[in-house]
Image (tube, coloured by chain):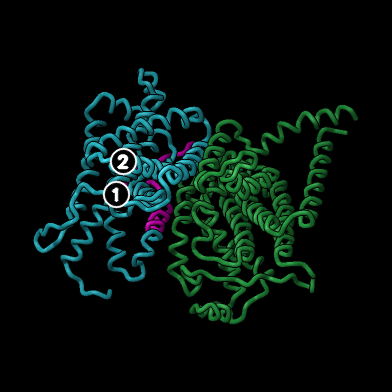
Chain colours: A green, B cyan
Amino acid sequence: MTRRWVARALTALVLAGAVVLIAFLPRVTSEFRLGEFTYVAIYFIALLGLNILTGYNGQISLGHAAFMAVGGYTAAVLILGQEGFKLLGQQPSDIIPKHGMTPIWTIPVAGVVTGVIGYLFGLPALRLAGVSLALATFAVAVSMPSIAKRFEHLTGGGGGLSLPLPKAPFGWDISPPHWLYYEAWGAAGILFVVAWLLVRGRVGRAWRSIRDGEVAAVSSGVSPAVYKTLAFGISSAYAGVAGALFAIQNAYINPDTFPLTLSILLLASAVIGGLSSLSGVIVGALVLEFLPIYAQDPPVLDVSFAKQAAPVVFGVVLMLIVYLMPGGAAGLLRRLTRPIVAAVSRRS
Amino acid sequence: MPLAFIWSDFAQQVTSGLAAGAIYASLALALVLIYQTTNVVNFAQGEMATFTTFIAWMFMDHGMPYWPAFVLTLLIAFAGGVGVERVLIRPIEHRPEIVIVIMTIGLLIALNGLTGWIWGPEVKAFDSPFPNRSVIVGNVAISVRDIGTFCVCLGVVVLLWLFFRFTTLGLAMRAVAFNPDASRLMGVRVGWMLALGWGFAAVLGAIAGMMAAPTVFLDPDMMIVVLIYAFAAAVLGGIDSPIGAVVGGLLLGVVINLLGAYVNFVGNELRLPTALAVLLLVLVIRPTGLFGRRVVRRV
């Protein structure tokens, strides 16, 4: 067997293992824990999108939580409809549909809406490279809460919108947390395959060539305008789906549900997991969900720290990763598995 | 416009806008100082400022009078800025810009958490050295605090300008910003000049923090909004132009204040998004800003 086939077989094995693990987790864990793993799936989706934009296309975004907010609000508004707004004592805007939708169908809609908005934002962003783009997206993330508060007929303002817990469809007899878990991981699985197909083919090659040298990419006939805005649109669509799932899982959304901190930590987790690597994304998602919890209450030690310990640990880990292993967790993994792959392919 | 237009009101809005603008200008200048030499925007600039402002608060909480605490804080800020460059930035200075930006983001996260961890998340009152009353000039009431803030911020900017213009060290630092390789060949210690730049930036940030704290109150997140205004100001003036940063800061302070006061749609809530709109517009229409150098890319 060639080395390449061994590597592929190993990847397939690990993926199959992950699918089995995800499918059987609900049988062995409590509903509370299950909720945490639902958030892991949601962050996984958002980080897939961010990695497409930042890792594969080299456009830095510090505002991905704002795109999640767009998705979250789209889903929330569609689930409630004008009737739901009135039940919450809110005055709805006329552009909101009269009746609410089934939650699961709002997820793709949120993805499309956020994707279009992200695509439009990508147009002016074309003129911004590197640091300026980071600045612009950072400013978007900071401004998002005040914009959401200002247009309260669309967003419920500072009071926010409460959402009903969704029931499993098709008369499926499982509790809402279980249903949300399967729903989130189902979406994550589909979007993972889509991302994989995108980055391994023609589009992914174009993205990477722009990242590694825009001038060279243009000379080879790759249009940066087309592919950069495409990356922005797709990345935002991922963020929108993640935001919609977040709002449904959280059963509540207000302007502070997707704070600036989340935007920053998303980028940090993407780097910790490893930029331009899809396998690193799962590490990033696990870090984003569990590092804050375990930084506050270290698992083995008999101490617990203030809430602020979490960002300190997060920041220090990020700085160490930048300093010591630029490839992130995925880079480390690659370095560790290389000898295994080599050994297996030599033996056979 | 809901109110009748009154000249004295307008003048008052302009003067308080100038005071706020002076704060934005200081922080914008800090960003420019670092951008000029390292080509990187320091996202941790605001958190560094907040951290040093908390240090000043701690001194005063222990009974130290305002001005000694002020000076001591500036010295600590300077040492801190130099330290950050030496320890965090220098080992990665030859890596791509995106890596350095991510490093400053790591610093932002860690410092923000550390500030809250050490001093707690509660909002604290921060003394101003200037009394909270007004003097009447013509028939315009101008707050003494605004005048003081304006004078301190711009005074430091002038001092810094004199330093860069008339001292050998200042000349060396300008040389490094202009052409690091040539400066190294001429015997300038480039590494230390970069560290000094970070030190000065930290001092400017500390001043901005201490001047902003009496009005916005002291809490770990207080500089995030100010940082956005400073970003917008720096971009408006041209991100590599120190004069641009100061002019951009003052201009932005006045314009935002006037829009907030006179345009109903903007009001109080949409001031920040307005700054964002300014930022985006400038970046799209004239990326070099008012005073920036055009960068020509060669193939």
Disc number for residue B56:
2
Kind of residue indicated by mark 2: Ala
**In the visual, does B127 lie left or right of A35?**
left
- Give coordinates of residue A19: x percent, y percent: 79, 51
- At 33% from the left and 43% from the top, the residue drawn is B53
- Give coordinates of residue A343: x percent, y percent: 83, 28
* Range shown magenta: B275-299
Q: Secondary structure at mark 1?
A: loop
**Which is nearer the N-term, disc 2 or disc 1?**
2
**In the visual, does A184 lie left or right of A340?**
left
Residues marked 2 and 1 touching at CB (< 8 Å)? yes
Subunit of label 2 = B
Q: Quadrant of residue A210?
A: top right
Q: Is residue B287 magenta?
A: yes
- At 50% from the left and 72% from the top, the residue drawn is A156
In the picture of the structure, the residue carrying the numbered disc 1 is B126
Viewer-side residue, A195 vs B21: B21
Kind of residue indicated by mark 1: Phe
Subunit of label 1 = B
